[in-house]
């Protein structure tokens, strides 16, 4: 059982470092209020999911979910 705990802790550390790296790679959302002026429907905004930025957003969601699941599993004493 200790081996499983060490494997999960190692995976937790790797996921945590990966999550920090992916969040830091994302672009800043400084143009957030620009959507009020009518800039919301641009070519970049419509095809954002096909870009690197869209991939980073999806990856950050997956890593965040994995981080919380691993944190929950590690709190259980087995």
Image (spheres, rainbow, N blue to C red):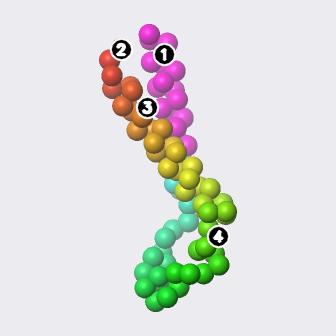
Seen as rendered, the residue at the extreme bottom is 37
Residue beneath label 4, please?
47
Quarter where residue 69 is shown: top left
Work out whether residue 40 or residue 13 is closer to the camera in this orientation and state it. 40
Residue at image mark 2? 78
* Of the image marks 3 and 1, the number of the one nearer the N terminus: 1
Residue 75 lies within the magenta run: no
Q: Circle 4 — which element? A: loop
Main secondary structure type of the part rendered in magenta = helix
Q: Secondary structure at mark 1?
A: helix
Tag shown at residue 43: none
In the rendered image, the vertical position of residue 37 relative to residue 41, given as above or below:
below
Q: Residue drawn at (48%, 24%), measured in percent from left and top? A: 8
Secondary element at tag 3? helix
Residue that carries the numbered disc 3 in the rendered image:
70
Highlighted magenta segment, given as a residue range: 1-19
3D distance between C-alphas at marks 3 and 2 = 14 Å
Write the residue at 49% across / 78% down: 31
Q: Which mark is on residue 4?
A: 1
Residue 63 location (% of width, % of height) = 51, 43
Q: CA distance from mark 3 to mark 1?
A: 12 Å
Q: Callout 2 environment at 10 Å: few (<14), some (14 to 19), or many (20+)? A: few
Identify which residue is drawn at 43% across, 85% down.
36
Q: Which badge, 3 or 2, is on the more N-terminal residue?
A: 3
| Image quadrant where one finds the N terminus | top left
Alpha-carbon span between mark 4 and mark 3: 33 Å
Task: Give the Cα separation between the discs numbered 2 and 4.
Answer: 46 Å
Q: Earlier in the sequence, mark 4 or mark 1?
A: 1
Q: Residue at x 49, y 33 (%)?
A: 13
53 or 41, which is in the foreground? 41
Lower position in the chain sequence, tag 2 or tag 4: 4
Mark 2 or mark 4, whichever is nearer to me: 4
């Amino acid at each position: 059982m200790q081996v499983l705990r060490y494997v999960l802790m190692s995976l937790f550390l790797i996921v945590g470092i990966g999550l920090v790296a992916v969040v830091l790679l994302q672009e800043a959302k400084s143009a957030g209020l620009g959507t009020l002026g009518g800039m919301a429907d641009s070519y970049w905004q419509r095809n954002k999911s096909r870009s690197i930025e869209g991939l980073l957003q999806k990856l950050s969601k997956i890593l965040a979910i994995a981080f919380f699941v691993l944190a929950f599993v590690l709190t259980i004493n087995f």
